[in-house]
Amino acid sequence: MQPVPTNSADMIADGLAVRVPDTNALDIIQKGAARIVIVAKAEICRVMRILYTDTHNLAEGAGAAALAAALQERERLNGKRVAVIQTGGNIDRTLFATVLSEDDIE
C-alpha cells in the first residue's frame, strides 16, 4: 500500500489525520498491525457522546476513535479482554456542542 496524500487533514478525528503520510511509518504499521479498522465520522461522534454522557469524560475525535473501532468489532472481540486508550480532550467548544446535540456535522 502506498501513502495517499490529501489536500486537507480537516476531519472530526484531526489528531489522526495527516495530509502526507510518512512512508516509513506506513511500512511499520503494515508490518505490525494484525488488523486495521475504519470508523466513520458518525461512529466517532456517537462514542464522543457516549463517553461524555456515561463517564463524564471529554474526548476529541481522535481520542474516541479506538473505542469506536472496538464497538464496531465487538462480535469479533467477544470473550476477549480489550483495552482502549482514551486520549485527547482538546476539542473546539462549538464543535463539541454540535456533536453533543447529535446534529449532522458535515
Image: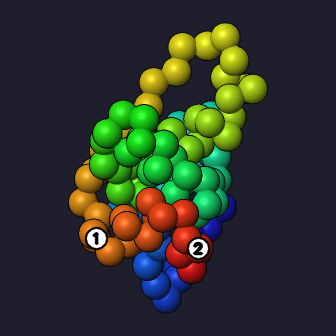
State which mark lies toward you, 1 or 2: 2
Residue located farthest toward the right when viewing the structure as drawn = 75
Give 98 or 84, whichever is nearer the viewer: 98
Q: Is residue 57 above or below residue 61?
A: above
Q: Is residue 58 left or right of residue 83?
A: left
Q: Is residue 66 above or below residue 9?
A: above
Give 1 or 60, whichever is nearer the viewer: 60
| Quadrant showing the N terminus | bottom right
Mark 1 is on which residue type?
Answer: Asp
Residue at image coords 30%, 48%: 58
Q: Position of residue 86 (x, y in %)?
A: 35, 39
Q: Is residue 100 left or right of residue 72?
A: left
Q: Position of residue 93 (x, y in %)?
A: 27, 69
Q: Is residue 25 above or below residue 55?
A: below
Q: Is residue 70 left or right of residue 90?
A: right
Q: How is the image coloured?
A: rainbow
Q: Is residue 81 left or right of residue 37?
A: left
Residue with the mark numbered 2: 104
- Whether residue 34 is visible to the viewer of this picture, yes or no, is yes
Residue at image coords 46%, 84%: 8
Element type at mark 2: loop
Residue at image coords 41%, 55%: 62
Q: Earlier in the sequence, mark 1 or mark 2?
A: 1
Residue 42, picture quadrant: bottom right
Mark 2 is on which residue type?
Answer: Asp
Residue with the mark numbered 1: 92
Residue at image coords 34%, 50%: 59
Pointer 1: residues within 10 angstroms few (<14), some, or many (20+)? few
Q: CA distance from mark 1 to mark 2?
A: 16 Å
Label ID, residue 63: none
